[in-house]
Image (spheres, helix red, strand yellow):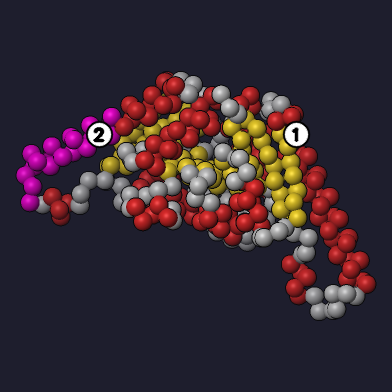
Amino acid sequence: MNANRILLSMDGSAQSMDMVDYASRTFPPAETVVSLFNVINKVPDSFWDWEEDPLNPRYVEYMKGWEDEKEREMRDLMTKAQQVFIDAGFPGDAVSSRIQERKSGIARDVIEEARRGSDVLLIGRKGASTLDEQLMGSVASKVLGKLRDLTVCLVGGKPKAGKLIVGVDGLEGSRRAVELAAKMMGAADPTIMLLHILRLPAEGRMANLSPEKVAVLKEEAVKGVNADFEKSIAILTAAGVSPAKITTKMVTGAPSRAGALLEEARQGGFGAVVVGRRGVSKIEEFQMGRVANKLAQVGRDLAVWIAG
């Protein structure tokens, strides 16, 4: 079995170290190769507000000192992050770090690096400069919008490792979500809930149907969900997840699928939610499904996995 290759986008924030801690407790050390990546901005934001001539010798001296300190701080953080993985049992030669000077822009540089053979990109939900705790950082937002062909894990807060919910809806996207959980985390034998939010046609559309017909429709829907659960369980157990650690749940009547997923995660103490990128509409294939998009926006205390 080939090792899973994970890329962590480090930005020097406390959130990026929380992401390191989560990843070190989530992935099986013997089957994972870790790359820590930072795009360093050699010019501070204050440059654009500098009132004096940039060629002033005092400014040049200031800039050189700022650059050296910034890079030194980042190297120290990278060393600390590498040690977290090593302490968690990852082989030293399976954990690497790289600092790159900004080229096309931080988000574009991260995306380009991720596409060089990574299986999943982990990025902090809130970057170093996000003032509002409820807002997603601009880099994370750009990466989610543009990186459609690769799995992204958006890490918010200090999520609990080893306990996750996988959203299952019978569509290709949810199958990818199950396969993602199996491939990336199956060997770590996590606790997994397979959750289906059953949405029947609006009551107004069933108003003219007899109670018997409505009951038949519900029964057929439940059968389809159970069959999907069985397929998902088979994928997970084949990857090493203990059957006793897999549960299934069907929720009906929820006004919002994303809301129901979040509520179940928080009520049950789950640290992660795994969903497919594609929504019900084919148009959403080119963007991001409504469920995935809403989870990314409001899941500020979770790891939100969006299967590419």
Measured as percent of width and height from the top left, residue 182 is found at 48, 29
User: Is label 2 or label 1 in front?
Assistant: 2
Measured as percent of width and height from the top left, residue 44 is found at 77, 64
The reply to whether residue 18 is in sight is: no
**Tag 2 residue:** 224
**Tag 1 residue:** 83
Q: Is residue 159 above or below residue 72?
A: above
Q: Is residue 179 above or below residue 134?
A: above
Q: Which residues are magenta?
A: 208-227
Q: Which secondary structure lies at badge 1?
A: helix
Q: Is residue 58 magenta?
A: no
Measured as percent of width and height from the top left, residue 112 is found at 62, 51
**Residue type for callout 2:** Gly
Q: Is residue 217 magenta?
A: yes
Residue 9 is tagged as none
Quarter location, residue 64? bottom right
